[in-house]
Amino acid sequence: MNRSFELRSLLSQQGLIVAPGAYDCITAKVIEQAGFPAVYMTGAGTSMSLAGLPDYGLLTMTEMVQNAARIAGAVNIPVIADADTGYGNELNVIRAVREYEKHGIAGVHIEDQSFPKKCGHLDNKQVVGIENFLAKIRAAVHERLDPSFVVIARTDARAVLGFEEAIRRANAAADAGADLIFVEAPQSVDEIRDIPRRVHAPCVLNLAQGGKTPMISLDDAEGCGFKLAILPGLLVTTVMAACDDALAHVRKTGTLPPLREGFTIREKFRRFGADVWDQLAAQYASPENG
């Protein structure tokens, strides 16, 4: 099935869609195997995993698209990707959207930070003028190759110009044709609740642990009226902590940590399709290869 169409079908149903963040094929596969309906490719996780760099807008469009393509190729559920600022003006946005589309991505979000951007939960961000932002959203909406491709407009104005301006930009982006609206980094529970009430389009909530937004439950997010919740840092934070613990154990004890029950080498490969590849090998093996 067309992944963009599949994502739209999910969004048309009742309830909240939850998309944990993946930064590589391993994390994408475990998200799918855990039963989630969609994957969110985190830009911060991509920057850290691909280049060992912070989320300071240091990756190119090509690097972001290539990572998204690998993730999309590893799973059978829709992938939503971070497209940063669109990597330039509205013409660059058009090319970025088309590149993500061609590589099987179901949708992207494009933000109003000035370039180079940084993580939405860091200080000292800057945003472009509203007309510059809306030009990018209109370009993305009208020039996408597939009308099912989902365009998410993200505004980072809350931290720079205040909550009221963020709501104004959110509604202007909805009027420009964005399919979903992403108000980044609300700073209180009241602001979280206000976003779906005041924005005239389906809304995205970013649950970024350790950031500026208070943590609420997914049930509460659904009750507030959000349509999509992304969990960008969940797995990268969990993996980093687990790696710290495992390496500290080795340094301290000179032994490997206890293996989780049933987590054999064969089982790890099975989760990445070893049984299918074994069947193919048996089907096509020549007598010479035994």
Image: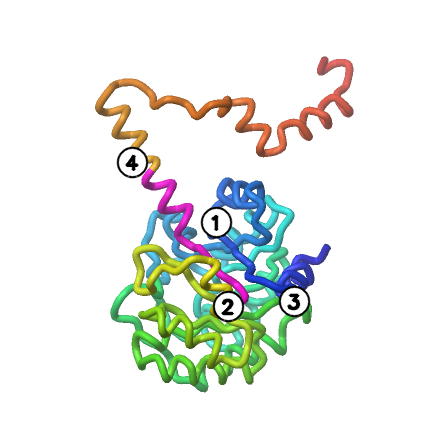
Residue at image point 36% right, 46% down: 237
Residue where numbered disc 1 is placed: 22
Residue type (three-letter) at the residue carrying disc 2: Phe
Label 3 vs 1, first from the N-terminus: 3
The CA distance from mark 2 to mark 3 is 13 Å
Residues marked 4 and 3 touching at CB (< 8 Å): no
Residue at image point 44% right, 82% down: 169
Quadrant housing residue 190? bottom left
Residue type (three-letter) at the residue carrying disc 4: Asp
| Residue 233 shown in magenta | yes
* Disc number for residue 226: 2
Residue type (three-letter) at the residue carrying disc 3: Ser
Q: In this image, 265 relative to 273: left or right?
A: left
Residues marked 4 and 2 touching at CB (< 8 Å): no
**Quadrant in which the C terminus appears:** top right
Label 2 vs 3, first from the N-terminus: 3
The CA distance from mark 1 to mark 2 is 21 Å
Label 4 vs 2, first from the N-terminus: 2
179 shown above or below 56: below
Within 10 Å of the Cα at label 2, are there few (<14), some (14-19), or many (20+) other Cα atoms? Answer: many
Q: Which stretch is magenta?
A: 227-241
Using the image as rendered, state which of residue 6 and residue 137 is in the foreground: 6
Residue where numbered disc 3 is placed: 12
The CA distance from mark 3 to mark 1 is 23 Å
The CA distance from mark 4 to mark 3 is 41 Å
**Quadrant in which the N terminus appears:** bottom right
Q: Secondary structure at mark 4?
A: helix
Residue where numbered disc 4 is placed: 244
| Residue 287 shown in magenta | no
Q: Secondary structure at mark 1?
A: strand
Colour convention:
rainbow
Residues marked 1 and 4 touching at CB (< 8 Å): no
